Amino acid sequence: MRTIQGVSVSAGIAIGTVRVLAAVDYAVERRLIDDPQAEMDRFRAARDTAVAQLKQLRDNVAAEFGENKAELFDAHRLMLQDPDYAECVEGLIAQDKVNAEFAVKSVAEQFAAMFAAMDSSTMQARAADVKDVSRRVMNVLQGKRDSTAQDGSVQGDAVQNGIVQNGTAQNGESHIIFAEDLAPSETAQLDRAKVLGLVTAKGSANSHTAILARTMGLPAITGIGDAFDPADDGHVAVIDGTSGAVFVDPDEATLTEYRRRKAEAEEHLSLLRKLKGKPTETKSGQRVHLYANISRPSDAAAVLANDAEGIGLFRSEFLYLEREDWPTEEFQFDAYGQVAQEMGDRPVIIRTLDIGADKQVDYFNLGHEDNPALGYRAIRICLTRPEIFKVQLRALLRASAYGNIAIMLPMITSVQEVRDAKRILEEAKSELRGERIDFNESIQIGVMIETPASVIMADELAAEVDFFSIGTNDLTQYTLACDRQNPSLERFADPHSPAVLRMIQMTIEAAHRHGIWCGICGELGADLSLTDTFLRLGIDELSVSPTSVLPLRNVIRNH
């Protein structure tokens, strides 16, 4: 057995025979031409054909995966129609008197290098997109045809290797595809009946190819680098899209374990097929919005895979916890923007940093506290160190231009804290307006209700914000005076305590009196023994771990 470690880009398990895609040679001969104008006309015609093909591909993707996933190919069309792109190609043809194919390839490499040099990983991933659209134009110029579109669209490695829709797999089997790389358009055209999973030597978790693999429900791993070996063709492999592990010629113990895991996953998938797209609604018509909690941008894949309606809690502090120095505005914007784009129109509620207590970061230099759970943490750090807070707020505002983002403030105990936070938010908005940077002017702001003080002040707080989200973990800790990090207090820290449930009831009632919605984002939200209680209390939203979404929806729909 050979074990390879790659980067997970799409969760799931695949077991099957490897099919290695032979790379297509995109070498283009440089030829001198006599009539630059005729060559420019030839380029324009090829570009128009490529744009039409992308429209066809866009419509195909929209029909199968939804409009938000099809927007990628709208972006590809805009790349081809970008005046700067056309001017560079035509300028090269006119100046150097070279053939259109060579000019397109040269400009693609120039643009790709520009994207790859940017600080943002999201922008770096666009290098693959510009190469993809340029190859499409080159293939039109060279007369290559594609099996998927009505007008004979161009193709790439996957198409030429016969694994696109309407293609023919070897012996009619399905395979795990190993390739140097896959372009977004190739991935979108894959015949899912013939493909079990994807493994590539190159690529990134931020690429459109990765996003499409997640949308299609294909386990996918990238970045195996030099471990990519064409000699693996025909061998049996197991890929674990969650851990990024690849096992070529797995031993019997590995096969047995992954068959068991796959069976469990398929049982969950059966529930997904039954409930996907169904509203989270009781038999009497009571509607509950069912969201998911995440800690990292890569977790958004699991949110979509489990058909959550949005993200109810993005724990942004993990962007700080997993670094050895301050995350820059650009780094945070990249992370928030990636999730916003991937979620499309679905809400993404991002909690501002909740550092302190059990989440310590050396470079914050917080110092020792005898009782950190009651100490310098969360909103208290943000309001006393506004230079840190404003960096995050600017990143959140900028990312709001790319999706349905809302901001949530943790550890609130007073109305003044909310007003102070909103003042800093307004300063950030004013700065971005001055810099002519787009953001959602009406971005929603909410608070976490996780202290008895915030419950008592809920009526006044509701007048200041757009929503409440109850953090039941801390609310239980502070209501019952039980440190949740102390295992000896476990028997006393009962989240089902009438005191905790009454706190939740008071919060919901206050929210509804003031016309705002109220959700739960703590662990109690997934406690199926309390679902009936929450429904009776009139909860509007529950945000749970992605894998808890479908079981919870099932219970609510049968209520």
Image (cartoon, rainbow, N blue to C red):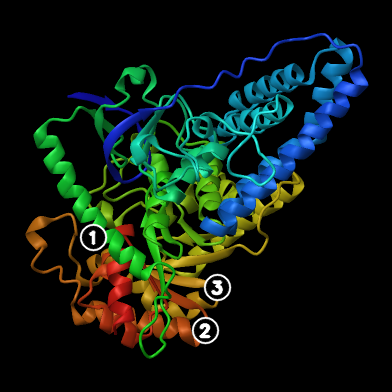
Image quarter where the N terminus lies is top left
Q: Residues within 10 Å of mark 3 (few under 14, many from 20)?
A: some
The residue that disc 1 covers is: 267
Total count of labels:
3
Q: Secondary structure at mark 1?
A: helix
Distance in Å between CA atoms under marks 3 and 2: 10 Å
Q: Are marks 2 and 1 in contact (CB under 8 Å)?
A: no
Q: What residue lies at 20% left-to-right and 55% top-to-bottom?
A: 264
Q: Residues within 10 Å of mark 1 (few under 14, many from 20)?
A: few
Tag 3: residue type? Glu
- Position of 236 relative to 312 (above/below): above
Image quarter where the C terminus lies is bottom left
Where residue 182 appears, x then y in whole percent?
Answer: 50, 32
Furthest residue toward front: 171
- Position of 346 relative to 434 (above/below): below
Distance in Å between CA atoms under marks 1 and 3: 44 Å
The residue closer to the viewer here, 372 or 403, is 403
Where is residue 452, by image quadrant? bottom left
The residue that disc 3 covers is: 464
The residue that disc 2 covers is: 514
Q: Secondary structure at mark 2?
A: loop
- Position of 84 relative to 414 (above/below): above
Where residue 262 appears, x then y in whole percent?
Answer: 22, 49
The residue closer to the viewer here, 92 or 236, is 236
